[in-house]
Image (cartoon, helix red, strand yellow):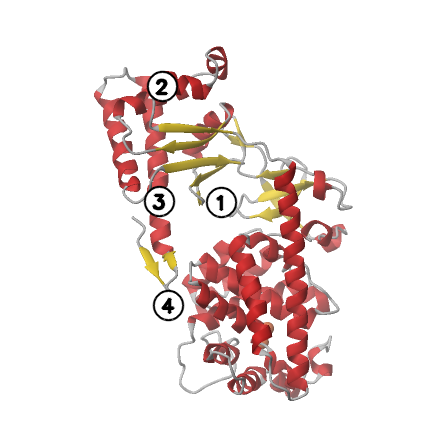
Amino acid sequence: MAEVQHDSQGEKRESFIAKQQLISAAKTAFQQLSTVMKNTTLYPEEHPFLRVSAEKFLGTIGALLADRKEVAFYLVGGELFFETYSVLADQGLVLLMEQFTNLEVSGIIFSPGLTEKELIKFAILMGKETTFFASQGGITEVIEQEGIAHIELRRVMVVDKSTSGAIKEGKKQASKIFMEAVETVKEMVQAVHMDKAINMYKINSTVQTMVDNILYNRDALMGLTSIKMFDEYTFAHSVNTAILAISLGSFLSFGKSQIAALGVAGLLHDVGKVSVPHEIINKPSKLTDAEWEVVKRHPIEGALILSDTPGLTKLAMVVAFEHHQHGDVRGYPWIDDRLQQHPFSHIVSFADTYEALTAARVYYKVQISPEKAIRIMLKEMNNAFDATLLKAFVNMIGIFPTGTLLKLDTGEIGLVMHQTRDLMRPRVLLLTKFDGSEKNNGAEVSLLETAGGQYIRTAVGTIDNQVAKIDLKQYLV
Ligand SMILES: [Fe+2]
Ligand SMILES: [Fe+2]
């Protein structure tokens, strides 16, 4: 079972591995439930095959119930959740999920005391048609009449106006936090230019707000990183890097204080660029060798600036120094003895590389889709990046990151809004008019949704929003 740990701040958290074990146990339980249901159609109630399958399920549920009051599964938009964890359902489970969805069941909750008899009765009932329940007064009523006291069903909830209002409010909030963070970086760069001290109070409080927002809802701020602002790009680059680094920290279940340290390191990683002349930073053509040497000094300059900053953890200095080293010979600054980089340097480095790759078009008119950026990074995996951490980064970003435009096999265009457990099947907003009007009224669907055991929609490719002339900002802000 998931062991509970406490981080240095005494925060309660589950380790990444414990969480994965929990999700896998939940998946097993759901698979076993599927077998029980199948067996009720093949064998009579007392048949040993049916009873053995029921016992197996009860064993898994019993173990899950050891440290929780109930075991709850939810079905939302074709996706299976155990509590708040998304469970990747393979094809075998898709039909069962559909069966529940057709009965308008969106949640199944098992509580302690569940007997084999109750379970088998429940499994038989779930194989019945909607018309049967309609004639008996409703599914929950039938469950009650049958004396099934330890299984509770939740009905499909219709998303009401207040929920969509909350989503809109969340996006507004995220874009305010984003703009404030850009201002903070700008002020910090100006202070360094004028040889003044960096205002660490401001940096820390900005990062704290970002961390709180991302822990609450990762998608809103992450979505904003896909919008590349030309005017303020140099500052937005640091904010985007910090958002991506914070998100990976939270994805890996780091403690809040570690996530905040990652955010500070992300925000400050390029501070050494103040020592690189503007003409070089903004040069659209290829840099000369001499210019390149100047650029390559920014990690050293950054570490020097940060070594002097009161109130800053040494980690930000280490990350600024190491963020281009990549653990191989092509990295810089070169040091004789190849030391291992701090894991936080790797994380900031992925965030920085991914951000820079996807933003290349801002200055250089190079078209790199988020999906291609991920592919480039995966190709470099064996030499330049820490493979395990990079895999986690890719899992977090998704194969089709938030803000990607997808061509669907139905002929529709979908804008990726949220990731699901299946990297190939995110939730998308269906676009038809490209003028932003779908934002409030458009249909958001999950590519995990099925009908007759088949996926309703599948992504067949990506579309470059620049080429298609679709302004993504109107959907993501
Ligand atoms: Fe850099
Ligand atoms: Fe950078």
Q: Could you tell me which residue is drawn at 36 percent across and 37 percent down? A: 71
Residue 190: quadrant of the picture: bottom right
Q: Quadrant of ligand 1?
A: bottom right
| Whether label 4 touches label 2, CB < 8 Å | no
* Disc 4 from disc 3: Cα separation: 28 Å
- Closer to the camera: disc 1 or disc 2? 2
Mark linked to residue 8: 4
> How far is the residue under mark 1 from the one under mark 3?
15 Å
Q: Position of residue 13 (x, y in %)?
A: 38, 57
Going from the N terminus, do you reach mark 4 or mark 1 first?
Answer: 4
- Quick check: can you spot residue 226? no
Query: Is label 4 within 8 A of ligand 2 (CB to nearest ligand atom)?
Result: no
Q: Closer to the N terminus: mark 3 or mark 2?
A: 3
Q: Is residue 219 left or right of residue 92?
A: right
Query: Nearer the N terminus, badge 1 or badge 3?
Result: 3
Identity, as a three-letter code, of the amino acid under mark 3: Ser
| Residue 124 tag number | 2
Residue carrying label 1? 422
